[in-house]
Amino acid sequence: MNRKPSMFEMMKLASNTEFRTAANKDVVPKATAAKLKLEHYYKVAVESAIERNKRRVELENKLAADVLTPDDRKLRQLQAYGKKESTFLRLKRTKLGLDDFRTVKVIGKGAFGEVRLVQKTDTGKIYAMKTLMKSEMLKRDQLAHVRAERDVLAESNSAWVVQLFYSFQDPQYLYLIMEFLPGGDLMTMLIKYDTFSEDVTRFYIGECVLAIEAVHKMGFIHRDIKPDNILIDKDGHIKLSDFGLSTGFHKQHDSSYYQRLLDNANGTVSTGGNPTRNSVMVNAIHLTMTSKDTIATWKANRRKLAYSTVGTPDYIAPEIFLLQGYGNECDWWSLGAIMFECLVGYPPFCSESTHDTYKKIIDWQTHLLFPDDVHLSRESEDLIRRLLTSQDKRLSVDQIKKHPFFYGVDWVTIRDIDAPFVPNLRSMTDTSYFPTDELQNVPDQPVGADTSGAHKDLAFLGYTFKRFSLNSSAF
């Protein structure tokens, strides 16, 4: 005979049900996080084993094809390579942190972090350390951009891209440890010299062509090509930096991926997110330049824009603003705007306010004007017009290389010739080509940094990187 449960038994049953429901809500996010971490761990382990085997096979094939080297010397090379791999494995197991680097000087400051000249405490080697605030990256929905930048730098072995040696994190910051390029950037050079001759412009624009091509061949679009991001090495040649707005069209370079990831981690269901979430213009434009009566005033404000949360839109292609779909041709528009500035002294669409600059870029057919007092060759003006044009008419990289403006350029050896300006350096830590006077009273370490050890936030899982190199200078 079935009896009805008492009130106490019913209350106990309800309480247990509520407890199980609450527990399930907590279990799902934890299980999701554990699953992602395990998947990442084994993915990295397998990829590392494949890379090691590939490096070994490549070296063995290279030695086998070398008929001039004695066998005993080949054996010593293989043994030395084995020691390199062992050293690298130990390095990968070592957790890097802020304590492993000593700040020499702050050489750059942006809206979400800083760039410091640092020295690794155990080796004494000099690097540039870029720091990014995690809280700002999350708040401003920049996770995809942060990951794309790290991936471009990690995947690249190109002489045209700033080399990344390490990346790591703590609870407050992301850190990118990169090679230090002591010659400053192209923006500083333009502010100093005002304009370049056509020969000097041909050199820098030609090198930029090869740098942008290298990024495109890796499957990435930079999307933020501007003089600030074109750095000068010790020999006067250029390298591209700051891939914070780049995209590789991988799932981890799409903001909706991180929205779903964070929703799953919180036990909530994603509704699909904002369709414009991955646009370059994340925030409303709210910065207006101070009164500008002359181009000189624009140049004075140029540095302030580089440090602001908005940045400068002067070099961004119209199709990016219009969110109408774009490909890597948007980087060639940016190059055209830089070429205009090199020859004329200011970008083609600069205005008193960023809002006016946007309007001019979108209506570029009306506002692309060459000043009467600047005399350009027919070839240089034609190349600029063929870059600052609609997507479907913009030149491809092969067409750019064949353009008459580049007549006589040897694209294979351009990096081996003498640069127009070679930095005059007093030491390996010389920062005289950086505007460090504007960066006073900056603390020795990033404000609020936690140096107690690495912390793996789910959104930044897999951010850590250490570069393998047969040259011992890499580690």
Image (tube, rainbow, N blue to C red):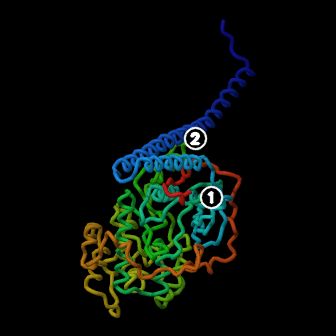
Give the number of the disc on residue 173. Answer: 1
On the image, the x and y values in percent for residue 224 come to 44, 68
Label 2 environment density (alpha carbons within 10 Å; few <14, some 14–19, many ≥20):
many
Look at 48% across and 82% down and name the residue there: 189
Tell which of 232 and 418 is nearer to you. Answer: 418
- Most extreme residue toward the top is 1
Give the residue number, with chain letter if any, for mark 2: 33
Q: Quadrant of the C terminus?
A: bottom right
- Say which amino acid is labelled 2: Ala
Residue 13 sits above or below residue 151 on the image? above
The image shows residue 43 at horizontal and vertical percentages of 49, 41
Q: Name the residue nearer the viewer: 122 or 79.
A: 79
Residue 49 relative to residue 204: left or right: right
Residue 152 at x, y percent in the picture: 45, 58
How crowded pointer 1 is (Cα within 10 Å; few <14, some 14-19, many 20+) is rated as many
Residue at horizontal 69 percent and vertical 64 percent from the top: 447
Instruction: Name which residue type carries label 1.
Output: Tyr
Decide which of tag 1 and tag 2 comes sooner along the chain: 2
Q: Residue at x 60, y 49 (%)?
A: 457
Foreground residue among 348 and 473:
473
